[in-house]
Image: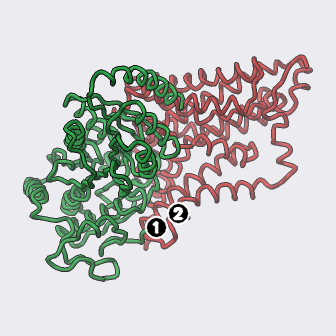
Amino acid sequence: MIIDINFVGLIIASIMASAVPLILASCGELITERSGVLNLGVEGMMIIGAISGFALMTVTGSLIIAVFGAMLAGVLISTIFAFLTQTLITNHVATGLALTIFGIGISAMIGKNFVGIPGKEFPVLFEGLKDTIPLLSPILFGHSIVFYFAFALPFITSYFLKKTKVGLIVRAVGDSPESASNQGINVRLVRYVCILYGGAMCGLGGAYLSMIYTPQWIENMTGGRGWIALALVVFSTWNPIKILIGAMIFGGLTIIQFHMQAIGVRIPVQFLTALPYIVTIIVLVVISRDSRKIRLSTPSSLGKSFHKNN
Amino acid sequence: MHKFLIRSFVSSLVLLFTLTVAAVAKDVKAAFVYIGPTGDHGWTYQHDVGRKAVEDAGFKTTYVEGVPESADAERVLRQLANSGHDIIFTTSFGYMNPTNKVAKEFPNVKFEHATGYKREHPNVATYAARFYEGRTILGTIAGTMTKSNVIGYVASFPIPEVIRGINSFTLAAQKVNPNIKTKIVWAFTWYDPGKEAEAAKALIDQGADVIAQHTDSTAIVQMAEKAGVYAFGQASDMDKFAPKAVLTSVENNWGPYYVDRVKAVANGTWSQKDTWHGIGDGMVVISGLDSQMPSDLQAKVKKLQADLASGKVHSFTGPIYDQKGNLMVAEGKTADDGMLAGMMTYVKGVEGDIPK
């Protein structure tokens, strides 16, 4: 079969679109984890963002309110997690799991009245340029603002962690909260902020699903993407650029396997559907196997509670 | 989960209350067990519409949503059976074993299992709808409306119900347009909007201009709307989600059957049986036809609908060949229910292999 160059562009564009929620949630969680906090509530925060965004869009009719409202909802639910783990010093793993269960439950409850309502159309940018350059046009143009933000985010995150003072503080808090505290850094405050930021990005990732990707509300519509985002953070060894690569591979294989099915490639479908999970992990493990770099980028105090006075 | 806990708590209160009431009144009470949320469209919603019809007929009903197809199902069933329900409808295939197991423990309670085939005890009946008749209509429309002659089909799991749908759809489409190709993509999910949308997008990118689905969310029709191709609604009328794309929907209509069976319990005439109703009995309903369909096609569809209802036309009328060219149904014959129930081979004209 002759492969049309615009067809390739279309496929890449759909791969990128499917990677957006993963990139947003992973980059948010990465900052949280870099500050030494393991928040397993990504799925819960995403689903809260999804319902909040959809509900606000339906009720207020304003997409701006809906997008920021979804981020705020992510912040609010992660405040619960921050309060429990940072102020009451509860276990990160248990609290994070509870957050996911809570998020799924409460989103279903809020969402009761929003099932079966069609979503609004989300405006896209540069639509007029869609047919100008072969191959690149569908990739570059005609996407939502959230799409462009998601692809800038790994680079911003990388710059933030490596080149800015605040980024260094976040890393210091994640690597050795004791030393950071001795330097006069308010560890609890830094961790609070990082948790809330993670919540905002997860909320945005969820809202992308319910408002832009498949504009509708359905119970459990994040469908485990929060867990994949969490896995991406770990397998990318806390490197935002590798998150981008991992999310693209995952999204890519999910979509390419559908294309392979439609073309009629004779590979067992079950294998094809498992492929994104297997290959994403293998690739990330292979590109991150430098143990020195892993040691450098793994937040040493990840998941450990910090008491100022102990 | 906590929603379920609250519901369990509330239903235990209801149980205490009803046990006292049940001693006085001898009303028939029906319970429904749902796999998903009742929502506003889709598989569970349609069952709940049926439940409301039972309420309207003057019976008391209860329902439990979001029951996993696991040991949880047994627990819910036991609780419902214990709390004075006379008939329990279990509305998903995966409840088959739990239903039969619990039915054995409660011989006085009637159990009705949707889409299953096991009736191990005299108090278990099964029922299903001949959705493939609806797909004959969709295939006819798709074969007529396609310009690219490529029809996309998003399938869920390789079980006879789904294969039968693909076959019935393809046979009907071929009949009106021998040049069509049906491209199948297996999503391996009943309900994941993101995945369903991606599957539909892949088919559209490969040239499909009509998309059929055997998954439950509205993501596919929305994707079709965005891409400017046609699609069909599944289980409920999905027209409002994609007014331009949706040509019609196949709706599941359980109400008449539910009312019938609950009444049978009240009259003491309930007996075990296996029900498989189609368009003729009103269990499968075709929604309004979109005005983009030419009027001769609309007339043809209406006629086909009437003929399927009367039995004049059967979705699987010979000669039907499988992919290798072996005769499945001889000329002038129709496939019997046994063959339909176990259908695990594609007919000629479907591309690809069935995942094993």
Q: Would you say B272 lies left or right of A62 here?
A: left
How is the protein colored in the picture? Answer: by chain
Residue type, label 2? Gln
Name the quarter where the C terminus of chain A is drawn.
top right
Report the Cα–Cα distance between label 1 and label 2. 7 Å
SS for dot 2? helix
Is disc 2 surrounded by few (<14), some (14 to 19) or many (20+) residues within 10 Å? few
Residue B3, x across and y down, in percent:
49, 28
Pointer 1 chain: B
State which chain is coloured green: B
Q: What residue sits 55% from the left and 46% below the top?
A: A19
Q: Would you name the residue on which mark 1 appears?
A: B355
Name the quarter where the N terminus of chain A is drawn.
bottom left
Dots 1 and 2: beta carbons under 8 Å? yes
Q: Would you say A258 lies left or right of B349 here?
A: right
Which mark is on residue A270? Answer: 2
Residue B154, x across and y down, in percent:
38, 57
Q: What residue sits 49% from the left and 30% below the top?
A: B4
State which chain is coloured red: A
